[in-house]
Image (spheres, coloured by chain):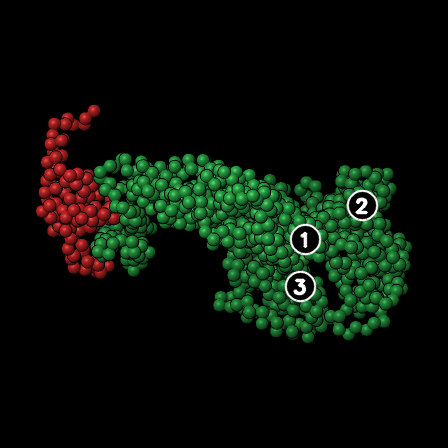
Amino acid sequence: MTKSAYLGEFELVVMATLVRLGDAAYGMRLRRDIEERTGRAVSIGQVYATLRRLKGKSYVSTYMGEPSAERGGRAKRYFRLEAAGSEALERSRSMFLKVLADLPNRPA
Amino acid sequence: MHRKSDPRASKQIPTLAEKLLLLFSPADERDGLAGDLAEEYLRHRLPTDGRLRAWRWYWGQVLRSLIPGLARPQPDFSEHPSSSSRVAGARGGPPNRGELLSDYLHDIRYATRMLIKSPAFSVITVVTLALAIGVNSAIFSMINVVFFSDIPIRDGDTVGFFYMQNPERGFVRQSMSLPDFLDYREGITAFEGIAALRQETAVLTGTDEPIRTVVATGTANIFDLWGTQPALGRGFLEGEDEPGAQPVVILSNGLWQRRFAMDPDVLGQTISLDGRQTTIIGVMGTEMEFGDMSRIDLWTPMEIDRSGEGRDRRDLFVTARLAPGMTLETARSEAAIIAQRLERDYPESNGGWLPDIQSFTEGLADASFWTILTLLIIMVGFVMLIACSNVATMTMARSTARAREIALRSALGAGRFRLLRQLITEGAMLSIAAGALGLAVARGTLEGLVWMAGDNSGISTFFRMLSIDRNVLAFTLTVALLAPLLFSLLPALRATRQSLTDTLSEAGAQSSGGRSALRGRRFLVSAQVALALSLMIVAGILARSMMEVRTLDLGYDGETLLTMRVDLPETKYANAPLQQEFFRAVIERLRAHPEIDAAAWVSRRPMATQAARGAFQISGRVEEDPERLPWAGVVVADAEYPDILNRWILRGRGIRTTDTEDSLPVVLINDETADRYWPEEDPVGRRIQLAADTGSERWLEVIGVLANDEPTDSNIPARPVIFVPLQQNPRSSMALIVRPRGAALQAAPLVRELIWEVDPDQPVADVRTMRQVFNDAFAGLDAVMAMHTGFAAFAMFMAAAGIYGVMSFAVAQRTREFGIRMALGATGTDVRSMVMRNSLLLIVSGTIVGLLAGYALGTVLANGVEGVAADDPLVFVVVAALLMGVALISIYIPACRATRVDPMIALRAE
């Protein structure tokens, strides 16, 4: 298996959040959700950079929404999980589960 | 910082940050990114965090988004989250804050290692910049005092200083008389208020030994007009400047500390001023201790006596504040009309006198101060240019030398951004070191200035106000941070753009720096010589002038003469006989004492201050126009005065003890007066009448001509002075000149004792030797000279270092060429003279430009400042020779190195 078959940590976080948000997945929501869930400061640029890479691997696709005044007249850029992405996410999850399964809590 | 109340202001998305974001993000992501940020900013951040924090959040998001976005190639940080940042420059942007920080720490460690590895470069760069920044800040602090300082006058831009001038007679920035002041106060509508201040002296008794105090007496509105109030107690009330008001006084902070031990209970106490019981109503704050104001001990309300004072007693310093919407121009035109009326109504006192309303900044300093300041700014600019060009040369040379290292790192996979960041970090570390050191230098320079200026000249009052303030601090840090950053950024950009194969190959490493770069460096050599030389010439001119002043033969031995001022309080010595009696009694005691060789009274010591000018009529010459009357400084002296100063009587006789109240009134004139007004004839026996005696029958007979005070063959222009006998012209304020048999200053207690035998309440002041009096007249110039000399030495050192650097670099680059030449038979001397010949041309052309620039600056200086002459060719020759010598040494050493090239080694490098 090539190494790109597995997701990096932050990629995994982004993809998982993407799934969770479903149709409402756009930059700002993703960023806030990740920040809340992981407790790490995340910049919008990092989120976009990761999504850009995931898009390059055809794991995600984008489509534009309607512009709104609240956004300074700019359209939302939505992200959607693609089939390949779904597979990669599943692969990473099962790998993580396998690797972590028999680990005691708080290993010495 | 919550400003929800202003919806319009708070709905603003930080424009610059958004522009940056749009500029640097990929086209297809732009809208999404900017929209996301805008939405979160407006919906979540502003309402909860407030404007400032939301603003900071937005900028943080943009910057943290952009920095990794600039990096190339895009890193997959997830794979080697810890190792990526360890390999210097091998990886791109950092994934999060923790990694980012460790990257910076790494950069800093690496930069420190690089800087330590070339200590000469680092130390010289830091010291060069620090010195340049330091002196720069010091000078700007000085300018700062004038433009932004905490002078205790509020809203300086609506304040004007109201002087009088008489262009026909060459009087500028003169004070105003009280009746004129009242007329202008009445007539000018452009002013919201107009206030006057007059300086007097009064003897303070009742506490300790009696002291002579400097009293500023002002109109009651003075503090309101300035927008300042005493720190303790109250200011003057309306009506307290009217005759008959209760006498009140405000203590200066200094006097309060010295005499009243900072006792807050002084308010309401009474002190005796010239014997008059006066109530203390306030204590000034320390902000009043600036400039000339720091000499003031007490503030009292002026007694506006509408009938008594003459219009020719011009001693009021007048400040005015413009009414809202009014300009100084309006005030000037209104004042001109009043002046015309006054000239018509009072031709004898007001003829030719015009108002001169100056703005706050104009009024603060006189022309010579501005000349000196302008020159200083030019000097600082030159020094800064030399320093910057040196740093640029060094950084350029270094980056060329490092081109291979950079190329190698880039070949190993370091991104351009990563390399740039590394180089910038190095620059920033130099900046910080130079900034910190520069601040210390600035402090030192300022303290040096204050110390040098002493406390006895017009310029020194400004120096005393100096301190580094926040504006200057900000300025220094900006310069410090920007300069090396810029210098490291430009070569860094070039270095990272270089083609790998060229640079990595031997040939590429040797040929870096093309024709244009070489020409640029050669120009720097010329320019540095020119800049340094012009500064050195100015310093040379000043040093030469000061040397002349210092070694001037005064005609007497100033070191052996003790002098002090004695001011009799007018309440105690109300009339002439009392005053005469005091002066006579003191002089008798002094002359009788075995320790005292000679003693004399004079109202003004040579060079100490300007004598009050008086106009006079010459008998037999009818002068209708009062403006064209002859004038001279009027000095009251006794019979001993010419003798104690070894002053020759050139014609006629001196003042004698027989010239008394009852005998014919006489006058002794100086050589300059005789030359000016009796050019063709002998003035002895002629009669003159002082303007003050106009209308009376009192004419003075000229009994003799006295040599000038000003030493001949000096640059100090002689002024006309006339001497009138003390016995015929009683005065309450005189100076004593004593020649003791022993050391001058050690006799001071004895002289004081003898004065106190006559009057135990009588204070003496200003105890100095006559040499000090003379030297102190030039103390300000002295400080300026020291400063210029320091700059010039610094400039010379920097220029030498710069030339040396450029030449070493040029020689190093041509090593192979020299090797070939020597292999083909050129001798060491041939090579050396070839290098020298090349550079000599640069140095000579720089010298010519420098001489011209120095002459121009010197002329400006000589025209603006008294006692300075720019016409000594010796200065130009010596200074140019010195600089050329230093420059030649700076090129000789690298030239010699060129001859030491071993042809075999040079060729084998091919």
Instruction: Answer left or right for B336 relative to B906.
Output: right
Q: Nearer the viewer, residue B447 or A92?
A: A92
Could you say which quadrant of the image residue B310 lies in? bottom right
Q: Position of residue B852 (x, y in %)?
A: 63, 58
Q: Position of residue B391 (x, y in %)?
A: 49, 46
Disc 2 packing (10 Å; few <14; some 14–19; many ≥20): some
Q: Nearer the viewer, residue B760 or B68?
A: B68
Mark 3, secondary structure of its residue: strand
Q: Which chain is red?
A: A
Q: Chain of mark 1?
A: B
Residue found 51% across the figure and 40% down from its top: B903
Instruction: Answer left or right for B688 relative to B880.
Output: right
- CB within 8 Å, label 3 to label 1: no
Furthest toward the top, the residue is A108
Residue identifier under label 1: B876
**Could you confirm whether marks 2 and 1 are on the same chain?**
yes
Q: Amino acid under label 2?
A: Asp
Residue identifier under label 2: B557
Q: Chain of mark 2?
A: B
Residue found 68% across the figure and 68% down from its top: B167
Q: Amino acid under label 3?
A: Val
Instruction: Answer left or right for B92 relative to B539.
Output: left
Q: Chain of mark 3?
A: B
Residue identifier under label 3: B172
Q: Which chain is green?
A: B
